[in-house]
Image (spheres, rainbow, N blue to C red):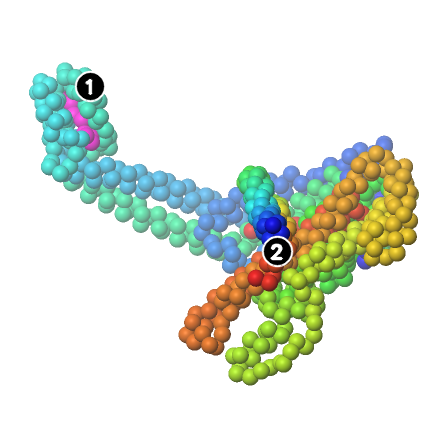
């Protein structure tokens, strides 16, 4: 019974890690998609803003990185480092 | 250093008789940012009388330059030299090249058009060349009509057309272009049949005799025109090469004269004198004094006092070493004159945040080399040269943090030396030389440390904000101090709560938080209190340092696990070496890019917003050097 509980708990962590990574990557992709199209519009009108505009497109990447961090933390909980 | 350069508001009163000379001196000195001057009882100045003439001549010169540009490689031309204004105007009068240039350009345009027309006619004739001996000039009489065009399938249409009266169809096997000859009285029936069959008519150019004869004539004519066009273009190129430097020099000279003649429209004017006002860097005020002194009683300089109601332009004042960080300041929003300049704070903060993200000795070395290469390659690009310098400066703390984190290309120093030893066939070390702070093994601690860094960084921001506001509004300065209170109280309560310090500090910390929130409510109102969760968000935002850093390590470790070349792998190791180096270089470049963006963001969004409102105006002195260079 205790073994089943431990396995269920590990599965929960693994699932959580996957969801954290997946959803955060989707959020980053969605934000970058919206920002990207807006930025292209700006650059088409005002090419001098290209440098600044690109930075705004890159910023949401960190959402995926945060998800990755959470996933790594959960992975370490189930002994990922030892593996 | 932490503040923009001190500015003075200079006011010069000058007699109209001396104004042209003074304007010339001011323009050459390039000291004063001349502003629009308005005084009750005085009129707004107008451009000098010479302005219209100079503008007209400039327009003429620019149109001449436009005619010359296509015939000269502009990139190879030297920077044009300016000459004295009167001399330039005299030179203009002697300029005799314009008419010849225009007539040659017109001829070249006409010839190009004729060549295009001949070529398009030749294309048409080429399509009907298989009717080689048919003289089209003899077709199309009062009785006989004809149509030439493309149709498919030829056989079926031919059969249908030949049923209409005396209509006959000439075609050649293998071609779907037909010649239809018909009696004028059948024209409507023929056209209707052709339209139904999807006939695509070819208009035979006027003057066409037989296609053979016409094509020969067109080709000969085309050759003659092309030869003449080449000769005209050569003439144009020769004239342009000889005169273009003179034209550019005249444009530069008259551009300067136009600026000087136009600047009086920013002055206030009376019957006999002008009043000129502008901003000058306080250290340069003496130089302006010397210039005005030359005019004796014709001109007078006054130090016009100003308060917070006017906004002087901002001139950043940092040591040369911090210049690339001024690039960040000026790229987003210049601090206004009364604010602290964040460039030095960026100089100290950005490389540290960057280094904490990359945190690898070998990546530090690699980024140093990449930065040096980029600095050389993009020496003349304002953005890239500054960004490369930011990478250059940040590479050194990166190496330092690499040593602290014990990260050497995704390996610990011990594993690196062990690996190198395997290649050298000797054991370089028997055990680790030191024990670093391994980020992968201490992620939670790392997250806590980065949040603490955020806490300190924002605290510094609030302190700078309090300094900024102190002379402007004590109330706002107190609000900034209240924010520091919220931060400090919150930290005390947190550390006491989790038992890292005595639990006595927990209620004390909470009391500080409550008092600070009350102070915040009193100074910034409800808005300040509503913004409290934002502070937590700002602090947590700094944990991106840990997140991005860990992501970089995982990629580096994956590269090492999969592709680390070992001597035991034999030939496979030779394949692995370039892949191993290439992927690490790629990971390093991604880390460099990401760390600069995210490190920059923490400085610009989270940190700077705590003390800087921005809205500074760029200092734009009336100067020869601000004259736009002629292409």
Please name which of the two marks, 2 or 1, marks the residue nearer to the observer.
2
Please provide percent x and percent y for residue B370: 58, 65
Q: Residues within 10 Å of mark 2 (few under 14, many from 20)?
A: some
**One can see residue B16 in this view:** no
Tell me the magenta residue range: B143-151
For residue B192, the mark is: 1
Q: Is residue B593 magenta?
A: no
List the single residue furthest toward the bottom. Answer: B426
Please provide percent x and percent y for residue B416: 59, 73
Horizontal placement of B512 versus B55: left or right? right
Please provide percent x and percent y for residue B62: 55, 45
Q: Residue at x 16, y 34 (%)?
A: B176
Q: Residue B571 occupies which quadrant of the picture? A: bottom left
Q: Nearer the viewer, residue B300 or B219?
A: B219
Quadrant (top left/top right/bottom left/bottom right) for the N terminus of chain B? bottom right
Would you name the residue on which mark 2 appears? A78
Q: Residue at x 79, y 47 (%)?
A: B610
Please provide percent x and percent y for residue B337: 81, 47
Horizontal placement of B170 versus B345: left or right? left
Q: Residues within 10 Å of mark 1 (few under 14, many from 20)?
A: few
């Amino acid at each position: 019974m205790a073994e089943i509980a431990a396995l269920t708990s590990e599965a929960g962590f693994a699932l959580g890690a996957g969801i954290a990574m997946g959803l955060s990557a989707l959020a980053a992709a969605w934000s970058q998609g919206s920002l990207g199209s807006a930025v292209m519009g700006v650059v088409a009108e005002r090419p001098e803003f290209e440098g600044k505009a690109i930075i705004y497109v890159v910023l949401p990447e960190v959402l995926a990185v945060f998800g990755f961090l959470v996933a790594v933390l959960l992975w370490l909980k189930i002994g990922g480092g030892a593996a | 250093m932490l503040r923009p350069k001190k500015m003075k508001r200079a006011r010069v009163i000058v007699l109209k008789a001396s104004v042209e000379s003074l304007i010339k001196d001011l323009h050459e000195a390039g000291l004063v940012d001349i502003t629009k001057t308005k005084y009750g009882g005085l009129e707004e100045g107008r451009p000098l009388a010479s302005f219209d003439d100079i503008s007209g001549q400039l327009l003429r010169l620019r149109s001449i330059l436009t005619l010359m540009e296509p015939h000269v490689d502009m990139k190879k031309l030297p920077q044009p030299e300016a000459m004295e204004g009167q001399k330039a105007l005299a030179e203009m009068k002697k300029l005799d090249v314009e008419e010849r240039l225009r007539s040659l350009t017109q001829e070249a345009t006409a010839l190009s058009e004729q060549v295009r027309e001949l070529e398009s006619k030749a294309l048409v004739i080429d399509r009907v060349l298989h009717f080689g001996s048919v003289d089209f000039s003899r077709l199309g009489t009062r009785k006989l009509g004809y149509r030439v065009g493309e149709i498919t399938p030829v056989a079926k249409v031919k059969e249908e057309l030949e049923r209409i009266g005396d209509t006959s169809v000439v075609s050649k096997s293998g071609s779907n272009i037909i010649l239809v000859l018909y009696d004028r009285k059948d024209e409507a029936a023929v056209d209707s049949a052709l339209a139904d069959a999807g006939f695509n008519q070819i208009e035979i150019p006027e003057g066409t005799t037989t296609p053979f004869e016409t094509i020969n004539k067109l080709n000969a004519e085309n050759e003659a025109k092309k030869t003449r066009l080449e000769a005209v273009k050569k003439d144009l190129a020769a004239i342009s090469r000889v005169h273009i430097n003179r034209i550019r020099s005249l444009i530069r000279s008259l551009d300067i004269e136009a600026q000087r003649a136009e600047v009086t429209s920013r002055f206030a004017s009376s019957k006999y004198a002008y009043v000129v006002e502008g901003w000058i860097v306080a250290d340069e005020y003496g130089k302006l004094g010397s210039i005005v002194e030359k005019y004796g009683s014709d001109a007078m300089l006054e130090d016009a006092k100003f308060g917070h109601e006017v906004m002087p332009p901002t001139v950043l004042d940092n040591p040369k070493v911090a210049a690339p960080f001024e690039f960040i300041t000026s790229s987003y929003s210049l601090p206004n004159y009364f604010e602290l300049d964040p460039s030095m704070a960026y100089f100290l903060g950005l490389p540290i945040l960057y280094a904490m993200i990359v945190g690898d000795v070998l990546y530090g070395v690699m980024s140093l080399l990449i930065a040096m290469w980029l600095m050389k390659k993009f020496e003349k690009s304002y953005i890239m040269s500054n960004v490369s310098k930011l990478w250059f400066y940040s590479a050194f703390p990166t190496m330092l943090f690499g040593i602290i984190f014990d990260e050497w290309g995704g390996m610990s120093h011990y594993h690196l030396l062990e690996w190198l030893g395997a290649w050298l066939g000797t054991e370089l070390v028997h055990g680790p030389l030191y024990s670093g702070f391994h980020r992968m093994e201490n992620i939670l601690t790392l997250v806590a440390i980065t949040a603490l860094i955020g806490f300190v960084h924002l605290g510094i921001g609030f302190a700078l904000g309090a300094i900024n506001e102190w002379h402007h509004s004590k109330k706002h300065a107190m609000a900034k101090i209240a924010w520091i209170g919220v931060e400090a109280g919150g930290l005390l309560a947190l550390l006491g709560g989790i038992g890292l310090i005595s639990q006595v500090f927990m209620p004390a910390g909470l009391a500080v938080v409550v008092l600070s929130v009350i102070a915040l409510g009193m100074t910034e109102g409800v808005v300040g209190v509503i913004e409290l969760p934002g502070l937590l968000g700002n602090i947590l935002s700094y944990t991106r340092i840990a997140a991005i850093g860990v992501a970089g390590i995982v990629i580096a470790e994956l590269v090492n696990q999969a592709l680390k070349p070992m001597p035991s792998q034999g030939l496979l190791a030779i394949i692995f070496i370039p892949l191993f180096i290439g992927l690490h270089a790629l990971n390093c470049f991604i880390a460099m890019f990401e760390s600069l963006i995210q490190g920059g963001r923490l400085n610009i969004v989270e940190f700077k917003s705590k003390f800087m409102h921005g809205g500074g105006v760029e200092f734009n002195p009336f100067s020869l050097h601000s004259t736009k260079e002629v292409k």
